[in-house]
Image (spheres, rainbow, N blue to C red):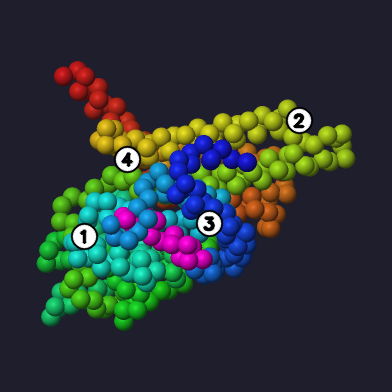
Amino acid sequence: MDNLHVFIKNEAQQAVLTHLHALSETITTLGEQADRENGFPYDTFEKLLDIGYNKLTLPKQYGGDGFGIYDMILFQETLAKYDGPTALAIGWQLGVVGEVYAKKMWSPAHLAQFAEAIVHERAVTNRIVSEVITGSPTRGGRPGTNATLINGNWHITGRKTFTTMSYALTHFLTSAWIEEKQAIGFFLIPKDVEGLTIEETWDMVAMRGTASHDLILKDAIVPEDALVEVNDGPRSTNINGWALHIPAVYLGIAQAARDYAVQFASTYKPNSLNTVIGELPHIQDKLGQIELKLKAARYFIYSVAEKFEDPKTHASISVELGAAKHIVTNSAIEIVDLAMRIVGAKSLQSNNPLNRYYRDVRAGLHNPPMDDMTITKLAQAALAEAKTEEA
């Protein structure tokens, strides 16, 4: 039993969690199947859309549920406890929609139009930016995908990697270089556009059920108003609060690993003992470490979310966002490792859930922001603070 109930603040949050709990068995079963087959749990996503999961972070004025960052973390952690890849995949929809509408990054017409699609057409999107030639997009590389305006239409050509949730996306929010503007543009491209295809390249040991294949754009033609964002200045490497949907997933996986280890330790009794292994001091030491790391990570991320959403402290929260991802992800890796030490070699069996948690949680190291960037920013912030105090 986790202590997530401590973080539930209202009936609206509880209602969503109740819906997720009702789907938990299906989500877990289909997630396991997708992992074995390197497939995609289509039925899970349909059921999530049935409960309106895609519109949770859409503001109420646009017909959504208006949930914020703190709420999103609560939902994502819970969903990830049932299946991490599913949570990571659908989480991009929550994060992208939350940021775009909170910051009003698009024109009023674009915001209204896409909101209509989310509410009435079950629209789902993801920000597609990764490319082999640029590496991680958080490091500021210019996209190799190019967009050219010809006779009132954009012609877009390029290849994108890590197109998470590729099979479920109705729209691809895709970055491309616009030569005439000397800027990076983001285009909202419907899935049925001619010249858009998905190439099945996803062959990882972790997060197999995310269908993070390559997006191929070969002279894909979209209207001029498909351009929804233009970034003609230096690319910011700062993350935003909505990106906390990522570490929330790894927190949920850690909770699932903890639950399995506790259940195992409280029931497994080898014939060499007259009691369950949970009574052994070295097992209790590992369980205690798991509890401590899990509580520290959970309290940190929810505290950061609260302070980020509080107007009184919002401006002072910056490096803490990256720190939350770092702390949660690395703690989750350690928690899964401890759980496997408790369970022993059985945890390496292909049908043991710890096997999957072990592979999936490792993927967190490669989601933005990267650990080295977080550590550097923390150091730079400390040095800047010292200079300010000296002045």
| Residue 57: x %, y % from top left | 36, 54
Mark 1 = which residue? 106
Say whether disc 2 or disc 4 marks the residue closer to the N-terminus. Answer: 2
Res. 389 visible in picture:
yes
Mark 4 = which residue? 309
Say whether disc 1 or disc 2 marks the residue closer to the N-terminus. Answer: 1
Question: Number of callouts in the render?
Answer: 4
Whole-Å distance between the Cαs marked 1 and 4?
21 Å
Q: Which residues are magenta?
A: 47-60
> Looking at the image, which residue sits at the far front?
11
**For the residues bearing labels 3 and 4, Cβ distance under 8 angstroms:** no
| Residue 217: x %, y % from top left | 31, 74
Whole-Å distance between the Cαs marked 3 and 4?
25 Å
Residue 19 circle label:
3
Closer to the observer: label 1 or label 4? Answer: 4
Q: Left or right of 145: which side holds 246? A: right
Q: Residues within 10 Å of mark 3 (few under 14, many from 20)?
A: few
Q: Left or right of 138: which side holds 152? A: left
Q: Residue at x 84, y 41 (%)?
A: 270
Q: Residues within 10 Å of mark 2 (few under 14, many from 20)?
A: few
| Residue 250: x %, y % from top left | 50, 47
The amino acid type, in three-letter code, at marker 4 is: Glu
> In the rendered image of this protein, does residue 210 appear above or below residue 307?
below
Say whether disc 1 or disc 4 marks the residue closer to the N-terminus. Answer: 1
